[in-house]
Amino acid sequence: MDDFDSIFATRLQEANEFYDSITPKSVRANTDRYNIYWQALAGMLWSKQYFYYDLDQWLKEHGITPWMASKQKQQIRNSEWFHMYNDDVISMPDKWEYPWFAAWDLAFHMVPLSLVDPDFAKQQLELMLRDDYLHPNGQIPAYEWNFSDVNPPVHAWATWETYTRDRELNNGKGDIEFLKYAFSKLLINFTWWVNRKDEGGNNIFEGGFLGLDNIGVFDRSSPLPTGGYLEQADGTVWMVFFSQRMLQIAIVFAGILAPLESLGWWAGWYGDDLDTATGNSRSAAAQPTSRTINRYVVYLDGIAQSGDKYTPDIEDFFGCAATCAAQRCGIDTGFNDVFSAEQASRSRPPIGIFVENGR
């Protein structure tokens, strides 16, 4: 081609401009850091691979049917995954050394990939939650050699991070349909964790491997040689993390999808001339002054005839929520005193309001 050099130079210029647009200034200022950043993203893009695996056919070829006794099926791996049908381009951990998908690796991959290809990142996260991947009992498939292994529940975190990055790239308009689909499926996965991995029903979780490669004195994913089951600190912490991410997503839904009109008299508080001088209200000082806010998420406790102090469990809830609130969310907890002063209702519930700024 006579114009090969000019075409190549144009494509290189376009690539430079694109990566400049998504690279933080502090990284661009250092040539070595910029090269590492660019090469890392290029490696992520390179690790896509077509993956085909028809479990129903594979298990039939190994003489396994859904109606066989469990002891017979256990001799063949993935014998509980007849519904699985993989026929997709998927992000691999490394398509040379590890040419198969691993769901929790994939979840981590999508956070950086959302910088360069947010549509692909969303599609991949949805893929692991699709009916031909997600087990009917709610488990996310782990990896090819044993889909039933348990991995840390990071899918909700990856979903949230991908949603927020995509929202920033689209001038504050987030993909709510993506978030809705993922949330509905993640609720099923959350239920699987609660039903299958909390043997004692005391919110102390098991799980097995959970990312701690080769550091245990025995295989945590296999039955204990002594019998019984292992209650794991890491499994419990992972579930706290899972719960926090689900709370973040639920807060967005409550602010965007909930009909505020149903709150009646309270829905119109913002912009009204409320007398907050009575009592020890913190709401006057906490009201935003320099930020545009148009979404509200309301937590109503419904304690009738309460005083002007929050109960300890409500304070604990606000403290926990503050640690996992989105970057652009604020928490205002000063409205209980306002309602006590205004006598706006016979029931005066403590109220916390989460505000997503400008979204």
Image (tube, helix red, strand yellow):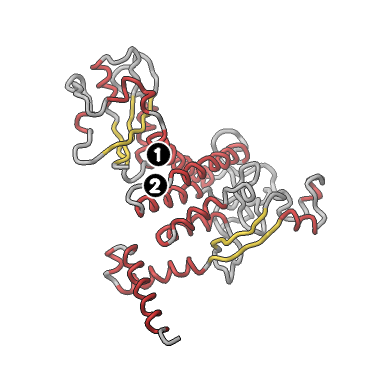
Q: Secondary structure at mark 1?
A: helix
The amino acid marked with disc number 2 is: Gly
User: In the displayed structure, does residue 64 sit left or right of residue 219?
Assistant: right
Identified at 53% across, 67% down, the residue is 47
The percent coordinates of residue 346 (x first, y second) are 33, 12
The percent coordinates of residue 135 (x first, y second) are 64, 46
Residue pointed to by mark 2: 174
Q: Nearer the viewer, residue 79 or 261?
A: 261
256 vs 275: above or below: below
Q: Nearer the viewer, residue 123 or 10?
A: 10
User: In the displayed structure, does residue 191 sit left or right of residue 355?
Assistant: right
Residue pointed to by mark 1: 252
User: In the displayed structure, does residue 190 sit left or right of residue 157?
Assistant: right
The amino acid marked with disc number 1 is: Val
279 vs 23: above or below: above
- Mark 2–mark 1 contact, CB under 8 Å? yes
**How far apart are labels 2 and 1 at the CA level?**
10 Å
246 vs 38: above or below: above
Identified at 64% across, 57% down, the residue is 86
Identified at 32% across, 42% down, the residue is 359
Marking on residue 331: none
User: In the displayed structure, does residue 82 sit left or right of residue 295?
Assistant: right
Label 2 vs 1, first from the N-terminus: 2
Q: Quadrant of the N terminus?
A: bottom left
Outermost residue to the front = 2
Q: Quadrant of residue 76?
A: bottom right
